[in-house]
Image (tube, helix red, strand yellow):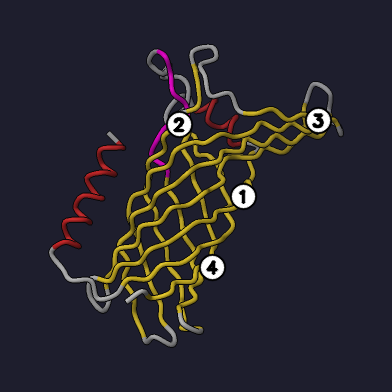
Amino acid sequence: MHRKLFFAAALVAGLFFSEASAQSISVGPRLGVNFSHVAATEGDAAHRNAFKSDQKDLTGAHVGVVANIGLTEMLSIQPELLYSQKGHRHEGVYRPWNTPYEYKYSLNYLEIPVLLKATFGSESLHAFVNGGPYLAYLLGGKNNYLIGGNESEADLELKYRNGVKPNRSDVGLAFGAGFGSKIGPGNLALELRYGLGLSDLNQYQDERDPRWPKYANRTLGVSLGYLIPLQ
């Protein structure tokens, strides 16, 4: 269902663009930092609260290429291709041993947002807002444990284990805002963006036990982008 929603939105964006002549096309890199965690919804409150109790934001990175296709002077479509790190981190005290611990669950995605962008102001200084769906594919990840000074790290297993495996597809919505300015031949933009994951991070061989929560990505990203006009 989530994948169908993404492709439907992308199709609508493509049809919208086909009906309008492009005012401008710009491309360039985007680089930034992610602060991510995982939301636990549905399921028993005890399981949700236990998961949330020691959770902290996990810091990662995102980097990729952006294309901005102008539809009018104010509106544009912005597809992106990003490598994006997400996941969650837990930090607290391991009660049986009364020992500090840290656990990191890192997920590496190939992500494709397709955003509708509205820009306000002049070329020298402008503000913008954007929003739209994204589709991400899980490339891999790591589990990292640090307990009492002893550290262990293992690659994320992408196969079923006890009837559960990581879901390799993640569909969600992205909403952003920022400021930009013309510097040199292109435009430099500073953006703050929130990613709302809609997919369960786990995939089950059978139905998910209703007592267990549904886990979904939540990401706050800060980035710099530089777009150079092609026409």
Q: CA distance from mark 2 to mark 4?
A: 27 Å
Q: Within 10 angstroms of label 4, few (less than 14), some, or many (20 or more) residues?
A: some
Label 2 or label 3, whichever lies nearer to me, is: 2
Tell whether 55 sits left or right of 119. Answer: right
Residue 224: which disc?
4
Q: Within 10 angstroms of label 1, few (less than 14), some, or many (20 or more) residues?
A: some
* Residue at numbered disc 2: 168
Inspect the magenta stretch and tell me whether residue 202 lies in it: yes
Q: CA distance from mark 2 to mark 3?
A: 29 Å
* Residue at numbered disc 3: 147
Name the element at disc 3.
Answer: strand
Q: CA distance from mark 2 to mark 1?
A: 18 Å
Residue sitting at x 29%, y 44%: 6
Residue sitting at x 38%, y 44%: 135
Q: Are marks 2 and 4 in contact (CB under 8 Å)?
A: no
Whichever of labels 3 and 4 marks the residue nearer the N terminus, that label is 3
The quarter of the image holding the N terminus is: top left
Label 3 or label 4, whichever lies nearer to me, is: 4
Magenta-highlighted residues? 197-205
**Which residue in the rendered view is the most extreme toward the right?**
149
Whichever of labels 3 and 1 marks the residue nearer the N terminus, that label is 1
Q: CA distance from mark 3 to mark 4?
A: 36 Å
Tell whether 116 sits left or right of 220. Answer: left
Name the element at disc 4.
Answer: strand
Name the element at disc 2.
Answer: loop
- Residue 97 placed where, x, y %? 84, 23
* Residue at numbered disc 1: 60
Residue sitting at x 50%, y 84%: 184
